[in-house]
Image: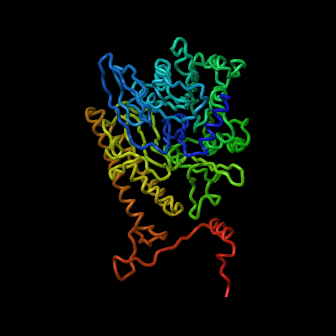
Amino acid sequence: MRRLFLILSVIGMFWTNSTDACTNLLITKGATANGSSMVSYSADSHTRYGVLVHYPAQQYPKGTMLKIYEWGKGRFLGEIAQAEQTYSVIGNMNEYQVVIGESTWGGLESQIDPEGVVDYGSLMYIALQRAKTAREAIKVFTSLANEYGYASSGESISIADPNEVWFLEIIGKAPKKVNGVNINKGAVWVAVRIPDGYISAHANQARITKFPLNDPDNCMYAQDVISHAREQGLYSGSDKDFSFADTYGPADGATIRGCDARVWSFFNRYGEEDMSKYLDYALGKNTKNRMPLYVKAKQKLSLKNVADMMRDHYEGTEMDMTNDIGAGGNVLPYRWRPMGFEVDGKQYINERAIATQQTGFWFVGECRPNVPKEIGGIFWFGVDDAATSPLTPVYTSSKAISKNYALGNGSMIEYSPTSMFWAVNRIAQFAYLRYNHIGKEVRSIIDDHEKARIAETQAIDKTALTLLRDNPAFVSEFLTNYSVNTANSLFEKWKNLDEYLLVKYIDGNTKKQNPDGSFKNNGFSPQIPPTPDFPGYSELWKKAVKESAGARLLMDKK
């Protein structure tokens, strides 16, 4: 019955509007072009507002308490002891270049502690404020969950620093009350280090199966992760055959299709191993044919490679969403929720790609091993759907953030004309109407912007290194100003782009332009354009309309 709950609840997620699902890509330094560890993350939720948080480093008197509010919901959970010293955090990355992301997979209802005080979201940001390495972050995350009680369901957590990338999976212990006290307070978990030169990913499906029991350099785990499963009647086999995912987060075809398929897409593009042999698994047709937790990268990935993978819609694969009439007349690689639908008594499901319309924010964290702490890593940050969202570079040594990305500037139910989240959403919503035209142009502008910023940060690094040698007191101010001003400039550019796209693509047509990008006029008045282009619809759409309308639209030849 406990396993049945998980399967039914996750399937229900796809057949309803409750699809708060995230994607993480994990890339070790040996698999990147510049030797940086990287983690990317999209915080996907229909209720999450995209902002860049900033927690400055602080000192607190001994005995200070920290109030915990559930991340994304605002529900008060309780208090924990505050650390006497915290580190600076920009977004999901701290001054020591530790970066953390997550994806939720739920798990068994029996493992949820209704009295837990620390939820996964709060633990991410607390760990960032207290840890100098990925290993320390794992310790902070899991020890606080055990001390105060874990208030969330099953999670996959990405944790990286300049030298290591770790994959943590965690779920609460089944509560057990003795004299009114929960003696099972805490969580069971496993953390696996991704080997250098390899890549991994997770997307709302538990993925750690069997793991080494005596290799602390590469695998850490809760000492009762297996015994707790036995106590709950979830597992009866040998320790060596224990699978964390199959025990605490079992999958079925629907969850694999909606979740692990995104991992397959990443591995398929950048893994050295032939991933076609796992296609039946990704399609949810052969649940026993599990993919490996990680694969060797077939090339050195650049920052741009990783960012663009977050914009993936299964292009060129069997799950390409532009190849059926669901794409409409303008080749839209999205499907609105719910994902599942029923026709003639049979259930069907639309694909759920990495790029999705309900993203609140997303990032690529670049943890750089050969850069001094005073300069730090670069937190490349964006809001809303990654496919129509530009990244802006934020140095982790920054002391401030752009007001256009700041918490408090608008919300999901409060429009703000100075919010980057709303500026990006305006363009995305317009692009969805004619994706093969408007979306294509937006993507071209994003590519030009990001390539320019990547080249620019290389020059900024050199200047910062010179300042660090000659005038170290000015390094932080220099990098803060660069990060804030670059984000502010991007906001202004996106506001102007919104206006430009409306003028160019209004009413389903496309205005003609001069080679310099200005709009053509009719030769008589500078305010009147010539007849615009009418690009029409895709051939797939035309054929579908013909079949649907039958003879009603047929024009007889005269």
Residue 451 location in percent, x, y? 44, 50
Frontmost residue, 157 versus 468? 157
Asked whether 453 or 265 is in front, the reply is 265
Q: Residue furthest front?
A: 179
The quarter of the picture where residue 272 lies is top right
Name the foreground residue: 469 vs 529: 529
**Horizontal and vertical percent position of residue 387:** 50, 51
Q: How many marks?
A: 0
Q: Residue at x 54, y 14 (%)?
A: 183
Q: Measured along the vertical axis of the image, is residue 58 above or below residue 551?
A: above
Residue 438, image x, y percentages: 48, 62
Q: How is the image coloured?
A: rainbow
Residue 298 visible at all: no
Position above or below: 252 against 313: above
Relative to 545, does residue 365 appear above or below in the rendering? above
Please indicate whether residue 481 sits to the left or right of residue 283 in the image: left
Q: Residue at x 72, y 54 (%)?
A: 344
Q: Furthest residue to the bottom?
A: 558
Residue in the foreground of this view, choosing between 535 and 152: 152
Q: Is residue 435 left or right of residue 128?
A: right
Residue 331 visible: yes
Q: Quadrant of the N terminus?
A: top right
Instruction: Point out residue 517 in the picture as x, y percentages from the top left corner.
Output: 40, 67
Q: For residue 549, what is the image quadrant?
A: bottom right
* Residue found at x 67% / y 88%: 558
| Looking at the image, residue 87 lies above or below residue 447 | above
